[in-house]
Image (tube, rainbow, N blue to C red):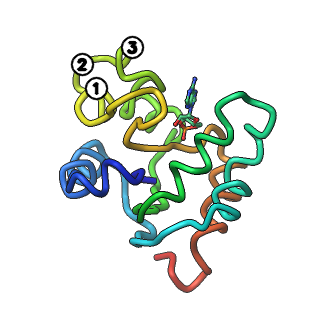
Amino acid sequence: MIKPEAAAAGHAGKILDMITGNGFRVVAFKYTRLSAEEAGTFYAVHKERPFYGELVEYMASGPIFAAILEKANAVEDFRKLIGATDPAQAAEGTIRKRFAESKAKNAVHGSDSDENAAIEGAFFFTGREQY
Ligand code: CMP
């Protein structure tokens, strides 16, 4: 996902360019908005964390871009490309170093496993929206 603040700031094109330039193939892509209920479901794994309420409110605060990306070793390589959760810790050349505002408003989300990537992809896209 390209998160609300990065989408609103007009960074989606540059972020997508970094993604495809690093060898990821776009399987699916859309501009959409999560309701608070949908954001709560998407981030249900963080339900017990102190920042859950803030996270859900923020993720529903404006439209986002959702994508399914394909590459060998995609989960690990994408996490390298986006950088650490906290942009202050993110390495030079990463998407978060360049575009994230804070630990909460950190520009992009990446799945943390192949299993979650399949779940999160199916959350946003039907089979016929994937190529
Ligand atoms: P993301 O990769 O989407 O996965 C969980 C999200 O929770 C994370 O990016 C951040 O946007 C958010 N998050 C993680 N830690 C914190 C924190 N300490 N305070 C606020 N938001 C956080």
Residue drawn at x 59%, y 40% as measured from the top left: 54
Q: Which mark is residue 89?
A: 3
Q: Quadrant of residue 31?
A: bottom left
Find the residue positioned furthest to the bottom: 128
Q: Which mark is residue 58?
A: none
Q: Are discs 1 and 2 less than 8 Å apart at CB?
A: yes
Looking at the image, is mark 1 or mark 2 nearer the viewer? 1
Residue bearing the label numbered 2? 92
Kindly state the secondary structure of the residue where label 2 is placed. loop
Q: Is residue 81 above or below residue 13?
A: above
Residue bearing the label numbered 1? 97
At label 1, the amino acid type is Lys
Q: Is residue 37 left or right of residue 73?
A: right
At label 2, the amino acid type is Glu
Looking at the image, is mark 3 or mark 2 nearer the viewer? 3
Within-10-Å neighbours for mark 1: few <14, some 14–19, many 20+: many
Query: Regarding ligand 1, which quadrant of the image does it lie in?
Result: top right
Find the residue positioned furthest to the top: 89
